[in-house]
Amino acid sequence: MSGTSTPSTDVRAPSGPRPRQKQRGPLAVVDIGSNSVRLVIYESETRAAATLHNEKSICGIGRDMVTSGRLHSEGCAMALEALARFKMLADGLNVMTREAVATAAARDASNGAEFVRRAEAAWGAPVRVLSGEDEARIAAEGVIAGIPLADGLVADLGGGSLDMVSVRGGKTGEASTLPFGPLRLMDSARSDADKARKLVDEGLAKLDLRGMKDRSLYAVGGIWRSFARVDMEATEYPLHVLQEYEIPRNRALRLCKVLSGLSRKSVEKMKVVSKRRAESLPYGAIVLERLLLACDLKSVVISAYGLREGMLYARLPPEERALDPLLEFAESMNARQSRAQGHAQEMFDWMTPLFVDETADLRRARKAICLFADIGWRRHPDDRALGVFSQVLTAPFAGADHRMRALIATSVFHRHSGDEDFPRDIANADLLNADDEARALRMGLACRMAFSLSGSSAGALPRYTLRVTPAKVVLDVPRREEAIAGEPVQKRLGALAAAFGRKGEILIG
């Protein structure tokens, strides 16, 4: 699958101080799929927009469509009820900008046009029926919005179709669509798993899936998110965040084999799977298994970003699309919750002499750490270190894999706790190696030292210089400021220097 579209820029370099983007919004997006109807209301049209409301209704309008050629009547009634409710919610939140799209079932059913007309009346705004290729490309743009360096194949599995497009370097390639959503597959295969496998294999054989060796499959859709939850439960994974959760190829194939052989009743016993997904999950596992076997992909990466996020991303001007989603989220949180805007950038610059050999990715992580370093100041002191750790670890930002999440969150823990040992029973134990833990400690202690010198006030840190020699970490303090270098600063400089295998020294002059 080849071809190109609009590129996005490299987002790894941290942004410096700049005016906040003017917020436009709120924006409501409705996605009418074959299996579910979902509403997402975004606070604004920005690179890291917060979600004001997120709600779905499992309606199954595409159920039995292969047999009947028509949308399921009961499912349509449920969908129209949901859309009427969504309109009331959007009205209540004064949403002026509203978008709605319908996908596989609505475009293929003989009564699809009639349903769309009624859906528009219920929602109170136009509904755009997407082609399979458009659906694939928009979902891929959503993946790029959340994982800017995604490299591989985006596969969006809805109730009625499997939509695929290659991604690399911020560009989307050729798109394709196959009628293998679980609802259609159940109808076509008549509950025969072997027949379902054969149907999927025949469809995939018609596509050019070369060039995927050692790249990743970016899995979009509720069925595959349920698949990931089952894997998390089975492996006792410590971080329950779906975005960028990665499953190695062989483990994914083993789980596909298990799940595809289960009955609906067996799946319903799994607490991590919604009962409304129980019937579809085995067929979603079949599709994933056949897709992995058809391509030499190294892993499955779950993307919580898809069609709806792609629609938001497409509305942004190019300069906003190019922004770093992690740093945009962190800057927004810093603006809302820290004591002094501007302090984070001063702290980042002040501590930079300690980290002259860091990679661009670690520099980006350090910028995020500085932005998150003061968001917990209103918390009770007994809860501050662990509370902010948990808040950052599970925050709804994009642009960071699970290792980076743990690195940033652990650094913020040490910013509040000092050099205390990190509790081994909370969720970073399996995500960071010894080098990562040492790095997190150093960055956290550097932030802690900065707050001792400045008390979070903007303009203070530039008066003090931090230097590193082969044996020491030196803090230069002007004579007129020597009172700042009391016992708390001496103690924290000593801890920071020790983390680098050096001695701390304060020079007054």
Image (cartoon, rainbow, N blue to C red):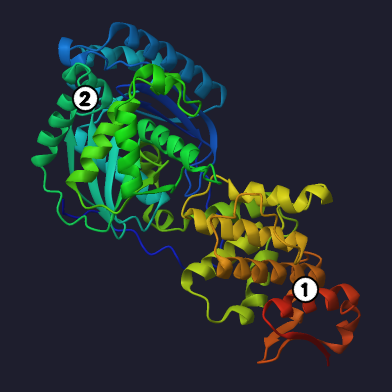
Is 487 situated above or below 399? below
Q: Quadrant of residue 191?
A: top left
> Who comes first in sequence, dot 2 or dot 1?
2
Is 17 situated above or below 480? above
Residue designated by label 2: 193
Q: Quadrant of residue 164?
A: top left
Is 272 situated above or below 288? above
Q: Is residue 58 visible?
A: no
Q: Secondary structure at mark 2?
A: helix
Task: List x then y, in percent, for residue 338.
Answer: 71, 55
Task: List x then y, in percent, for residue 442.
Answer: 66, 71
Q: Are marks 2 and 1 in contact (CB under 8 Å)?
A: no
Going 55% across and 61% down the picture, which residue do you hit? Answer: 432
Residue designated by label 1: 460
Q: Nearer the viewer, residue 187 or 134?
A: 187
Query: In this image, 122 relative to 26: left or right?
Result: left
Q: Secondary structure at mark 1?
A: loop
Quote the CA–CA distance across marks 2 and 1: 67 Å
Q: Nearer the viewer, residue 46 or 378?
A: 378
Going 62% across and 62% down the picture, which residue do you hit? Answer: 369
Q: Amino acid at mark 1?
A: Ala
Q: Which mark is residue 317?
A: none
2 or 1: mark nearer the eye:
2
Task: List x then y, in percent, for residue 108.
Answer: 18, 21
Q: Is residue 375 visible?
A: yes
Q: Amino acid at mark 2?
A: Ala
